[in-house]
Amino acid sequence: MLPIQPARFLEDLHNLRGFGAAGLGKGVVRPAYSEADIAARGWLAARITEAGLRVHVDPVGSVFGLAEGPSLLLGSHSDSQPEGGWLDGALGVIAALEIARAAREAGGPAVSVVSFQDEEGRFGVTTGSAVWSGSLTLKAADLLVDRDGVSFGAARASMPGRSEMFVDPSQFSGFLEMHIEQGPVLDRESEAIGVVDAIVGIRDMKITFEGEQNHAGTTPMQGRRDAFQAVSRFNTLLADRFANVVTPRTVWTIGHISLHPNASSIVPGRATFSMQWRDGDADRLGRMEQIIRDTAQEVASSGGFELRFGPMLGLEPVKMDTRLRGALETAAEAEVPGRWRVMPSGALHDATNLSGLMPVAMLFVPSIGGISHAFGEDTAEADLVTGLSVLAGAVAALG
Ligand code: GLV
Ligand code: MN
Ligand code: MN
């Protein structure tokens, strides 16, 4: 067993939360390339150096701690949603750091660490690892814009200490990512560990309805081309049209909407909104896309709106590697016999992108009340430490 130090691990996790701490409880506001994110990555780089690893910040600002020669890669991301919790991503990064330290102290195996940039999709979908894996070119990524119109290219230029070189993935024998579940299952069933079998696929695009801006008092209801009403009608129709295609696990979300000019006394002339959908079956994602496009077109044609679709972003569903997953299952059974399960991930992870480069596997610890992407996200510290022990057990076995 590796000589992991739970107290040192928890202290680093709390220290990382100090960058961007917000809200009551343990909330964090640390979106990609924000001041807090850049400062957190600087702190992490110092901890990596202290751990005896070589720091490499790649062209997009993903921070690696590299062991000499071939190694196993562990990590996740340290950026957050616009309102997030202290564990989403941070847990996997700090667990990786602790295991790399313990492994060095034990004389092996060689473990490298990573915190990917923009996993939370300020610009794209898992942008940093998507670029590293080659599924998104740096040129295409640079053109992506956030909801305020800032480009990825401009944002990454603000991050100091970047190398012009990407890390060569052939030095890694595999990738293990520890994460909070972000759903209700483990907490509800009083189980300690989830070993992931597959990660769902996702599609994400912006849609715009352009109608006619006008006076909210004098423009008769009949004949208005109100862009908000177009979104509302689209949303209602969509639920109906999806009914025969989706399963109870399929999800879709309109999470961001921008109305122009967004004022009480003006009939909105333009609405741009995010349309995101997720499922474990790539065919179903495709069928849903067709329904979304057709329904939006129908709303636009019948109401006299101009319709625009933004670029389609997405990740395919992926399965975890059998050998790495087996090592996590064996370690879970040794640590918490009968109190773990195999389960799919409905959240996205950098592991999806890395599955194109090397074998990958993931483990989950419970999320209290199933809350995540919210300030209320939390996990009992005993469960965090159990997850660390299972990860360490798997690394020792694989090494
Ligand atoms: C990543 O955090 C996701 O949106 O699942
Ligand atoms: Mn995450
Ligand atoms: Mn997240």
Image (cartoon, rainbow, N blue to C red):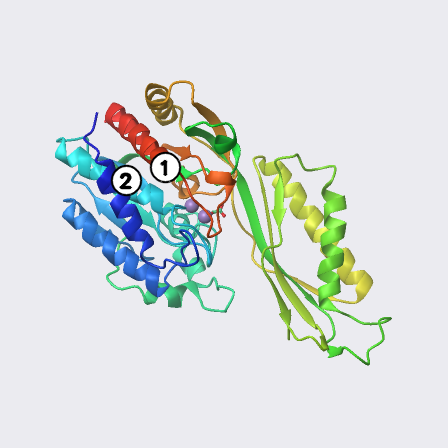
Instruction: Indicate the amino acid at tag 2.
Output: Ala
Front residue of this view, candidates 8 and 201 = 8
Front residue of this view, candidates 192 and 273 = 192
Residue 283 at x, y = what percent?
A: 62, 37
Horizontal side of residue 68 vs 166, given as left or right: left
Task: Answer few, some or many: residues within 10 Å of disc 1's Cα (few below 14, many 20 plus, some between 14 and 19).
Answer: many
Name the residue located 74 percent from the left edge and 40 percent from the top edge.
243
Q: Quadrant of residue 350?
A: top left
Horizontal side of residue 68 vs 332, given as left or right: left
Q: Quadrant of residue 29?
A: bottom left
Residue 46 at x, y = what percent?
A: 19, 53
Horizontal side of residue 135 vs 17, given as left or right: right
Residue 258 at x, y = what percent?
A: 61, 66
Above or below, 211 against 301 in this view is below
Q: Are marks 2 and 1 in contact (CB under 8 Å)?
A: yes
Asked whether residue 288 is in view, the answer is yes
Front residue of this view, candidates 84 and 122 = 84
Asked whether residue 356 is in view, the answer is no
Q: In terms of secondary structure, where does tag 1 sit?
A: strand
Residue of label 1: 178
Instruction: Indicate the amino acid at tag 1.
Output: Met
Horizontal side of residue 207 vs 38, given as left or right: right
Chain-order first, disc 2 or disc 1: 2
Residue of label 2: 96
Above or below, 321 against 50 in this view is above
